[in-house]
Structures are given as structure tokens and as C-alpha cells.
Amino acid sequence: DVKVTQSSRYLVKRTGEKVFLECVQDMDHENMFWYRQDPGLGLRLIYFSYDVKMKEKGDIPEGYSVSREKKERFSLILESASTNQTSMYLCASRPGQDSYGYTFGSGTRLTVV
Amino acid sequence: GNSVTQMEGPVTLSEEAFLTINCTYTATGYPSLFWYVQYPGEGLQLLLKATKADDKGSNKGFEATYRKETTSFHLEKGSVQVSDSAVYFCALSSGYSSASKIIFGSGTRLSIRP
């Protein structure tokens, strides 16, 4: 069964910490995405990547960066965590063809205290 | 730009009732259309999809037909179960590059009473 695996289901971090959220897919997909999901705001795209070492800003990139050194791994980095980054973070991957949907990971619920 | 509008929830139904969740879209060209489901505490799962006009996607008793003339992709199920309680997202993809993003609706929370 194909999978997108997010390294943690729950994380609690302190304000100002540098936080790494890891995502790995085993489907050889070209494209990978990071979203955050908040009540009443739906899914908001933070960053995406269409190839190794390539990245594009999404709708809300401020306060985040990403890294994609290998095709299967896409990391989201919170440079200095703040309480307004408390959220559910969802990673997704997708092959190049437009008719295919995303495969999502199970999500990481991050709490910044 | 591209967008998806779906009916606001929450929707509460009794078990075995008929379900319709409305979804309309705005897009250039010929988008692919999707329904995703999110169970509590989990990520989103692809429920069904349709990639061209008049296609019908189906899975687990759910169906949706791609209607280009009305720009709609309504989700239906003939007899819902308690286990169908979840949040449902309508979505579209109309990119022409390999990095095309999927645009999601705001989600509709469905609750089924026993």
C-alpha cells in the first residue's frame, strides 16, 4: 500500500524553538506539498516542491522554510516557532499527471507553548 | 482564478438517510474533480474522482457526476451509516504543469445519528 509518512502525530514545542516536520513518501512522486489546517480556515498551502531541491511558495509561507534534498523526503521548518503556528500540518504527494489526486499523510498536530 | 464552493455544514442526518453535499467550481479549461474525506484526527483520503465531463466517480457507496454544463460535482449516497461521519472536501485540479496544485473547498462536516 502506498504511503506518505509524517514523522510525528503530536508535537509540543516552545516559542522560539526551531522545529522540523518530516514527510516521506514511497511512491516516487515528483510533487510534494505542505498544508496547515485550522478550524474555519480550511486547508492553506504553505510550500510545495516539484523536484529535488526545487521549491515554490504557497499562500502562507511566512515563518516557514522547506528542504527537499531527496525525492522521497520533504521537510517543513519553522525557523522560530510562535504560538500562532499551533496547527495541524498535513503533507501530501502527487505524481506529475494532473488526473491524479494527492496522497496525504496522517498529519502532525503541533502545539507551540 | 480557480475556486471551489461547497455547502456549509454541519449536516446532520439519521442513519439510512439520503445524502447530498453540493459542490460547484470555477475553473478554466477542463479540470479534474475530487472528493476527499477526513475522519477525526486523521489526514485526508481520496474518496473518488472524475477527470472529464459526464464521468461518474464512485467508491464505498458514494457517487459524484462531473457536470460541465452546471460546473458541479455533487456528492451523493443513498443510505448513510454512522461510520460515514467525517468532514468531506470537494477539490479540483486544472494545472497544466506537473506541479499543479489542488484547490480545496472549505469542507462540510457530516454527522450521522444512529
Image (cartoon, grey):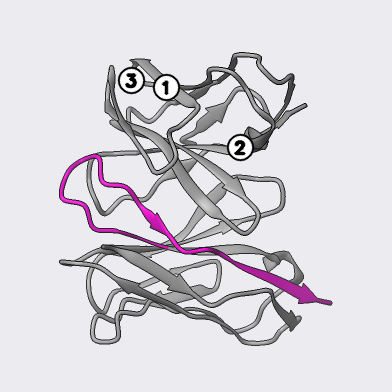
Choose between A20 and B70: the one closer to the eye.
A20
2 or 1: mark nearer the eye: 1
Chain letter of disc 2 in the image:
A
Q: Tell me the tag on residue A71.
A: 3
Asked if disc 3 and disc 2 are in contact, CB closer than 8 Å, the reply is no
Residue at the spot 40% in from the left edge and 17% down from the top edge: A67
The quarter of the displayed image where residue A9 is located: top right
The answer to which of marks 1 and 3 sits earlier in the sequence is 1
Q: In the image, what residue type sits under mark 1?
A: Val
The answer to which of marks 3 and 2 sits earlier in the sequence is 3
Distance from disc 1 to disc 3, alpha carbons, whole Å, reads 13 Å
What crowding class fits label 2: few (fewer than 14 Cα within 10 Å), some (14-19), or many (20 or more)? many
Would residue B104 be found to the left or right of residue A109 on screen? left
Is residue A97 shown in magenta? no
Distance from disc 2 to disc 1, alpha carbons, whole Å, reads 17 Å
Q: Is residue A108 visible?
A: no
Q: In the image, what residue type sits under mark 3?
A: Lys
Residue located beneath label 1 in the image: A66
Where residue A84 appears, x then y in whole percent? 65, 36
The quarter of the displayed image where residue A70 is located: top left
Q: Tell me the tag on residue A107.
A: 2
Chain letter of disc 3 in the image:
A
Q: Which residues are magenta?
A: B91-114
Residue at the spot 67% in from the left edge and 71% down from the top edge: B110
Q: In the image, what residue type sits under mark 2?
A: Gly
Disc 2, SS: loop
Disc 1, SS: strand
